[in-house]
Image (cartoon, rainbow, N blue to C red):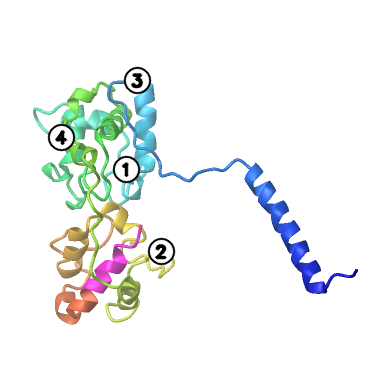
Amino acid sequence: MRLPVGVKVGAFALVVMGTYTYYANSIPQIQSKPPAELSLEGGNVTPAQLVKAGEEIFKTKGTCEICHRIGQPGTRAPDLAGVGARAAKRKPGLSAKQYIIESLLQPGAYIVEGYPNIMPAVDKPPIALNRSEVWALTAFLESLGGTVDVTLDDIPKTVGAAAAGGAPAELKIPGDPKAGEVVFTGKAGCIACHKAGKIGASPVGPDLSQIARIQPPDYIMKKILDPAGAGTVAGYPKGVMPPMFGQSLTAKEYVDLVAFLMTLK
């Protein structure tokens, strides 16, 4: 008895799917998980291990390398080469570790001459390091020319306390990022000076490709309306960014532009 072609094709398809399913299920499954937060509280850790963990945070979650370099002057923020030694001489009455901790948690407390007050607190969104991560990052910075002597007790217990009670809800900007991209490349003319991911390539102004990783929404909103008041990024000329966007953009265009910038991570 000859089977209809349709039945043959269907049977063949079932065999093929069964074979692929068997092999797929036989392969160990890798579950994708977000990187775990560093937690050193209550554990034994050597200074070398702490410094290594801090260096990793400096390069990844801390996003420090977006603005800072080590041994490379002329970037957005001060060169951190030798900061472990310099830190002890920055503010009278503060040791190196005290100055570094203050600089991470209250960056506006002391501003290095020639640089604007634009660094966010590392324990607050969007960076949001926990207490152990701030401890490790401090140790790494101390190691750059200084002595690593920071302990967990040196880091305020309030650091990371909010995260321990549950991460705050992500701030939603009530705008249309797609429409904001059109404003960025069109009416606002941002593309003439800034790069944003795959958009633009001008070196006139800072690269905004990761702006939402290093700055909170309030800074971004203020920078559009009052560019001079928000400070000029080191290495770029002052007074170039126009101050008239508050008048030239409609409320919707402004909110859409902020929403687009907040996607740049």
Is tag 4's residue or tag 1's residue first in the polypeptide sequence? 1
Q: Which residue is located at x 33 percent, y 80 percent?
A: 186
Could you say which is closer to the camera, residue 16 or residue 262? 16
Which image quadrant: the N terminus?
Answer: bottom right
- What residue did someone put label 1 on? 62
The quarter of the picture where residue 248 lies is: bottom left
- Give residue 45's mark: 3
Residue 104 to residue 247: above or below: above
In this rendering, position of residue 201 left or right of residue 204: right
Q: Dot 3: what SS?
A: loop
Q: Earlier in the sequence, mark 2 or mark 3?
A: 3
Q: In the rendered image, which quarter contains the C terminus?
A: bottom left
Which residue carries the number 4 mark? 158
Look at the image and say whether residue 258 sits in the magenta stretch: yes
Observer-side mark, 4 or 3, equals 4
Residue type, label 2: Gly
Segment tinted magenta in the rendering: 255-265
